[in-house]
Image (cartoon, rainbow, N blue to C red):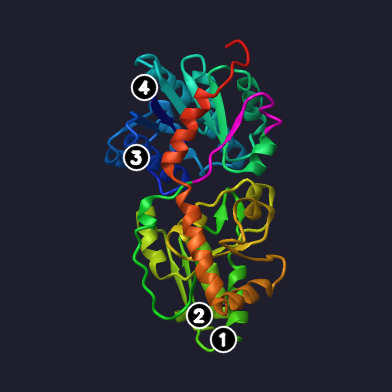
Amino acid sequence: MSSIALVLTSRFPSEKAYAVTTLETARAAESLGISVQIFAPSDSAGGQVANLTKIGNKLIRRLSPLLGRVPAKLDACVFFLRRILIAAEFKRILRASDCLGVIVWTRDPIVAVIVINKTRVFLEIHNTPSRIDSLICKFLDKKMKFSVGTLTINHRDQLRKYFPSAEIAILPMAVSDSFFLLDRHEHGREIVGYVGKGWSSGEDNKVYELIDSAKLVDTEVKNLIQWKFLGLESSYKSSMESMVRGHKWEMSQFEFINHVSHDEVSNYLGDMTIGLIPYHDSAYNRQRFPIKTLEYAAAGVTILATNTPGNLSILSSDFCYFYNPDDATSLAKAILSILGDHKNRHLKRENARNWAQTHSYNARVEIVLNSFGNTKERGPN
């Protein structure tokens, strides 16, 4: 029987999507009878996770506080060195244990290349590899005990230049059962919401554009629509609140909620009626599979997304409405259209829930296990 080692080089636990999916993946593996252990750098809060092995030594602990607090070029060097140290420390732990049957599942190519001669490795990649990481990926490509996966078909095609030989599995995001069990709170009013950050991996999500769209909608409807923004950074939240005041609108029409734990997100979706995916087209957004799409779908929230190539590669008009982010009036028109589309709106919500049910964490685990069962020998290890 295989066991799984989930190895992170970023802090865990965390409210970041990578940490949430790691914890849910571990739970899914255990439900399938698979032994699983999480290895990650962690602070004192890590004791809350029973199957977590903390990775750390004096140098790692000294480097960690520097991240984000030094000039950009130095920060990149610190981050890279820290990744190497964490990977080496994990290899030391692995060497001291019985690694027979272990699958190392990681998002870091450095971890993959350091342990590839010891055990099987599944590398999950969400972004375009850096120059150094791309060289590592090309080296790993022909290894016998190596498999790789990503979130979308679009990104799989982009990764082929780094992995010309390896089979690249599609490993879509997943949603936990708590979102399907949600009790909806219908108040007879529309609440349009966004769950997420203003910035993602250094890219502005342009959430502030939604404020101007709110005004366009209000001029066309009798009953004011409530707007809810959940999880914005404090500085981004302050900027959007200033925009509302600058337009001299009622602040009570807008609700800005700072950080909440992922376990609480489903509670806030209980009264949200339209959930927004407002991302513009970019190289980064073409690679994404926003977990909020599945959370909206599972919670019975109508999905309204930009019609970008990235969104169109994972979403369908069978269960989602779309708008053009380059047209300042498109979002408002789409919302007004949804308000008058009662029959199709209900059907799309049902279709969305069915779609979300096909994206389970159990399925992710099984895809990883099967990737080794189907792995062909590609060359000497």
- In this rendering, the answer to whether 328 lies above or below 177 is below
Residue 225 numbered tag: 2
| Label pair 2/4, CB-CB below 8 angstroms | no
Q: Amino acid at mark 4?
A: Met
- Image quarter of residue 317: bottom right
Q: Amino acid at mark 2?
A: Ile
Q: Amino acid at mark 1?
A: Val
Quadrant of image for the C terminus: top right
- In primary-sequence order, the first of circles 2 and 4 is 4
Q: Which residue is mark 3?
A: 27
The percent coordinates of residue 229 (x first, y second) are: 48, 67
Viewer-side label of 3, 4: 4
Count the numbered circles shown. 4
- In primary-sequence order, the first of circles 3 and 1 is 3
Q: Amino acid at mark 3?
A: Arg
Residue 1 numbered tag: 4
Q: Which residue is mark 1?
A: 221
- In primary-sequence order, the first of circles 4 and 1 is 4
The percent coordinates of residue 87 (x first, y second) are: 47, 25
Mark 3: give few (<14), some (14-19) or many (20+) Cα within 10 Å: some
- In this rendering, the answer to whether 289 lies above or below 365 is below
| Label pair 2/1, CB-CB below 8 angstroms | yes
| SS at circle 2 | loop
Residue at (59% x, 48% y) in the render: 288
Q: Report the magenta residues as a range.
A: 160-173
| SS at circle 3 | helix
| SS at circle 4 | loop
